[in-house]
Image: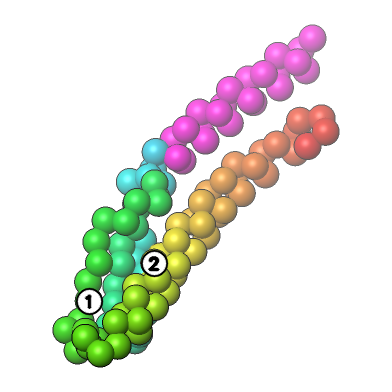
Amino acid sequence: MKNMSKLLKQAQKMQSQVVKAQEELQRKEFEGVAGGGMVKVVVNGKNELSSIKINREVVDPEDVEMLEDLIVAAHQAAMEKVKEASDSVFGSIQGGLSGFPGM
């Protein structure tokens, strides 16, 4: 019974760590850049796009598709940073699951 109590306390501690990590991640901002810095986007840990900066030099009415591609590429770069941060944070917490049977 002591082992079960110990496991329950570990689970509660991990749940608290997960909630805290989620809150911290959601407050962070991640920048994605494309076109050598011509397009920058910022997303937060909630995966919400918060800003886009476009250098005037890249705005060409004759080549809108290029600008669209740069925006998408910058957004993807930012989202990859969010994923990497999330994997890093939650991977370390998940490492604590080794004490649980079947994990």
Q: Classify mark 1: helix, strand or loop.
A: strand
Residue 25, position in %: x, y? 41, 47
Q: Earlier in the sequence, mark 2 or mark 1?
A: 1
Residue 76, position in %: x, y? 45, 67
Left or right of residue 18, residue 69 in this image = left
Q: Which mark is residue 73?
A: none
98 or 39, nearer to the observer: 39
Q: Which mark is residue 75?
A: 2
- Residue 57 drawn above or below residue 39: below
Magenta stretch: residue 57 in it?
no
Colour treatment of the image: rainbow
64 or 29, nearer to the observer: 64
Q: Mark 1 and mark 2 in contact (Cβ < 8 Å)?
A: no
Q: Residue at x 34, y 76 (%)?
A: 68
Q: Residue at x 32, y 56 (%)?
A: 49
Decide whether the magenta segment is chiefly helix, strand or loop.
helix
Q: Classify mark 2: helix, strand or loop.
A: helix
Assess disc 2: are there few (<14), some (14-19) or many (≥20) residues with their C-alpha within 10 Å of its C-alpha.
many
Kind of residue at badge 2: His
Identify the residue at the far top of this view: 1
The stretch of residues the image draws in magenta is 1-22
Left or right of residue 20, residue 89 in this image = right
Q: CA distance from mark 2 to mark 1?
A: 12 Å
Residue 29 visible, this orientation:
no
Residue 31 visible, this orientation:
yes
The total number of labels drawn is 2
Judging by the rendered image, the residue that carries numbered circle 1 is: 54
Quadrant containing the C terminus in the rendered view: top right
The quarter holding residue 100 reads: top right
The quarter holding residue 39 reads: bottom left
Kind of residue at badge 1: Ile
